[in-house]
Amino acid sequence: MKNYTITVNGNVYDVTVEEGAGSGVSVSAPAAPKAAPAAAPAPKPASVGAGSIKVEAGAAGKVFKIEANVGQSVKKGDTVVVVEAMKMEIPVVAPEDGTVASIDVAVGDAVEAGTVLATLN
């Protein structure tokens, strides 16, 4: 008999696994889940003075590299952030000319499609 702790959709379960003679594996779990551990920290709010033009992730992934700095001028199509998804590097570009007002992510952050990565003025 082995005991495991498993998290499913934020619910934590203690599970006991017993090997039955010739009948495979049987699993028993408690009727109600335990309290889940503390949630991950909330995303960082945009910087004070953030711009009105949003630079958003086109796909879910992980921030691989930040190409632009706050205060830097960028042209439409210039790479601002690079997101890695499925071992591919995807440049996220400025939607129009402007000045970088805020960078709202850090290298290594997990992001979803539509997440605001930076803002421009």
Image (cartoon, rainbow, N blue to C red):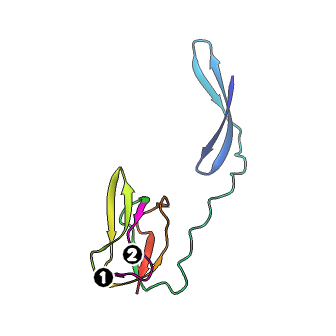
Residue 52: mark: none
Question: Badge 2 is on which residue?
Answer: 55
Q: Residue at x 48, y 58 (%)?
A: 108
Q: Amino acid at mark 2?
A: Val
Q: Amino acid at mark 1?
A: Glu
Q: Secondary structure at mark 2?
A: strand
What residue is disc 1 on?
96
- On whether residue 47 falls in the magenta region, the answer is no
Answer few, some or many: residues within 10 Å of disc 2's Cα (few below 14, many 20 plus, some between 14 and 19): many
Find residue 19 and report its image quarter: top right
Dominant secondary structure of the residues highlighted in magenta in the image? loop
Q: Secondary structure at mark 1?
A: loop
Q: Position of residue 112 (x, y in %)?
A: 44, 62
In the rendering, at what x and y percent does residue 61 appear? 42, 57
Point out the residue furthest to the top here: 22
Q: Residue at x 56, y 68 (%)?
A: 43
Q: Position of residue 95 (x, y in %)?
A: 31, 78
Identify which residue is drawn at 47% across, 62% down: 107
Q: Is residue 64 above or below residue 81?
A: above
Give how far across and how far down residue 56 sits, in percent.
39, 72
Q: Is residue 59 left or right of residue 42?
A: left
Pick whichever of labels 1 and 2 is earlier in the sequence. Answer: 2
Based on the picture, tell me whether residue 71 belongs to the magenta stretch: yes
The boundaries of the magenta stretch are 64-73
Please indicate whether residue 59 sits to the left or right of residue 109 in the image.
left
> How far apart are the two marked residues, 1 and 2, measured between alpha carbons?
10 Å
Q: Residues within 10 Å of mark 1 (few under 14, many from 20)?
A: some
Is 100 situated left or right of 78 in this image?
A: right
**In the image, residue 94 above or below residue 112:** below
| Near-viewer residue (18 or 39) | 39
Numbered circles on residues, count = 2
34 with respect to 21 (left or right)? right
